[in-house]
Amino acid sequence: MRKLLLTLALCLCAFSGARADEGMWLIQSLNKALEKNMKARGLKLSAREIYNEQAGGVSDAIISFGFYCTGSMISDEGLMITNHHCAFSDVAALSTPEHNYLEDGFWAMTRDREIPIPGKEVYFLRRVLDVTDEVAALKDSLAAAGLNHGSRRISAIMEKKYATASGLEAGLTSMWAGEKYYMSLYTVYTDVRLVGAPPVSVAAFGGDEDNWEWPQHKADFALYRVYTAPDGTNAAYAAENVPLHPRRHLKISTKGYKQGDYAMVIGYPGHTARYSSSAELEHVIHVEHPVSNRLRAAQMDIIRQGMESDPEIRRKYSDAYFSLSNVAELQEGEVSCVDRFDVIGRRRTWEAAYMQDYKPLLEDLDAEYAAIRDIERQKVYYRETLVRGLIVSRYFMRMGSAKNLAGARAQLRNALEATDPGVEKALLAFSVREFMTHIDPVFFRPIHREMQERFGSDYDAMAAWLWEGSCLAGFGEVPDDELVAAFQGDIKADRLYRYIRELNIVAMNEAEQHVADLPALRRSYVRARYSVLDGQGVPQYPDANSTMRLTYGRVRPLSPWDGVWCNWQSTAKGLREKYNPANHDFAYPDSFKAVLPPEDFPVNFLTDNDITGGNSGSPVLNARGELIGLAFDGNKESLASNFESVDGYNMCVCVDIRYVLWIIRHLGRLDYILQEIGQ
């Protein structure tokens, strides 16, 4: 035992001295220095084998899933894998009381049973061009002619030009607030069909309690298939369409990995703000987030109570609750970690040391954020109570923009089918209380003033009055068909609609006493920070913006707190230890219980890859570019990473591809899929 402990201690000492390789590097900018670093970490490929516009590379197998998630091709027959939580909305939308695919899982036993997903798009990156000089020339020519030369105008002109010339989808992106511009060219496919998804209790085992935590034991994956017209071109869904034959698909490795092994993630990270000023960080973390975090926590509690009371309410609200909780926990973690690691203090120290030449800019930023603080806080209340305080709000907005009575009634029916009256009434009561007590009455519209005059501070009475004066009156008490038939189309006279819709947000914007142009200040700061770091010879990667990036690192353990050490891998033993049939988050179905892997079977693992939202579903690749897992989460200690990567704490939580294959084989019983991917 003493020998084992000594070995472990030596291993930890060796590993604690290794720093993470921070960076979300542009896939087309893998230069010699990066390649050398990657090879030093263990990479067996050349940079040109990863991204190569002429000969193709590993990146050709990676897709953007609508620019909110990442996926990868794993067969020559259009089979694509991503995270279950990326497929969550699709699976929830397909679920009915008779076929609850969210709770029971979905497995297409043959290709003709795959389910088309309307509106789904997958993007394959074909080429990236540096168009910085061309953008500058275009701006100058438009300005000289006295024409609009704003970013939207520039993007429209450039994207149209390159789309016409290439026949591909074109997207212009700005890096470092205009220091560089790149044009990305994509092939897009729109016939995408769901192939398989495990039950949510298996895919998201541990639920909210384990979200952003380690260890986890999730089977966070789903399978889709991409189809084309018979000639291989993009086409809308049609029975005669055929599976896509991608230029490249990933080879799956079941050989495993060990601590310290090279790991690489390629994907489409959505957003980071690592070039933010200390003033902006202070505003986001200590002005905006505390308000939205408190409101969302209360809304989640209301919805959770409804979900726990009735399986049908759980089905209806699962998607909304999932989206709400993921953002809420992320922002709560951002506040905690930014404070824990003193990110704001360190940024201010850096600014004081290296941005002496930009002191007026820093002073203007501080003054501007101080000037807008109160109104911006009220805007958060507006967004969280009116814009998204009720789930039914989205349907009311669509009713307001419907072209005719039939369209408005269709949206009302959707609202009734998608929501529960008890949950919506509780959300409304909470919304009214928070809105009426935190918004300055100067911004009230007639409906809000009438509420105040009628009921004073009786917020429950206000909420009841709004409900009874809406097209939802009687919801849950009379048949839905009667409510829909009774609606005559005048949604703008509906009290609840007016409460949600009529706040004078323009007046809020006009009330802000700006001392400077904040967007211009932000751009100036980003360029200044870039210039300073460039002058110091620091290799830089731009903030994430849904363009393809590569991050490299290693499989490694985590020490989240002093005296605490976590292994780099979880096993099926944890599935047994955490199982609790009385807790929905930890209760998987008997069908899965019957096919649990052996206790030592690998389930999830950790790497120190630098990821963020949008990387969900990204392939985790070994040194040979083979698929060993999928990125699906970060750890709670990493949640300052939107603003700053903190060495030793930023981890990527991954599902082991061997666990994915086990579930496909033993729970899904999709033998034809296993044969298709060579397993």
Image (tube, rainbow, N blue to C red):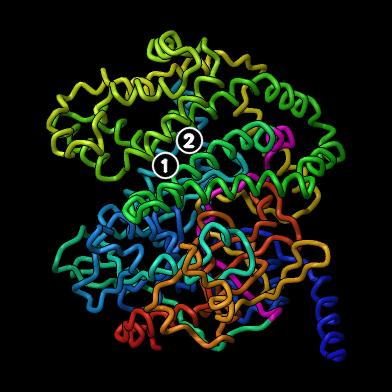
User: In the image shown, does 26 or 283 lie closer to the viewer?
Assistant: 283
Asked whether residue 60 appears in the rendered view, the answer is: no
User: In the image shown, does 211 or 506 lie closer to the viewer?
Assistant: 211
Q: Is residue 434 above or below residue 339?
A: above
Place of residue 445 in the rendered image (x, y in percent of width and height, measured from the top left): 42, 12
- Picture quadrant of residue 29: bottom right
Q: Determine crowd level at label 1: few under 14, some 14-19, many 20+ residues with C-alpha closer than 10 A.
A: many
Place of residue 195 in the rendered image (x, y in percent of width and height, measured from the top left): 30, 71
Q: Residue at x 44, y 60 (%)?
A: 85
Label at residue 138: 2
**For the residue marked with disc 2, what is the amino acid?**
Leu
- Picture quadrant of residue 249: bottom left
* Image marks 2 and 1: residues in contact by CB distance under 8 Å: yes
Per the image, label 1 sits on a secondary structure element best described as helix
Residue 277 on the magenta span: yes
**Residues in magenta?**
259-282
Q: Which residue was labeled with disc 1?
A: 158
User: In the image shown, does 453 or 18 lie closer to the viewer?
Assistant: 453
Left or right, 653 with reference to 97: right
Q: Earlier in the sequence, mark 2 or mark 1?
A: 2
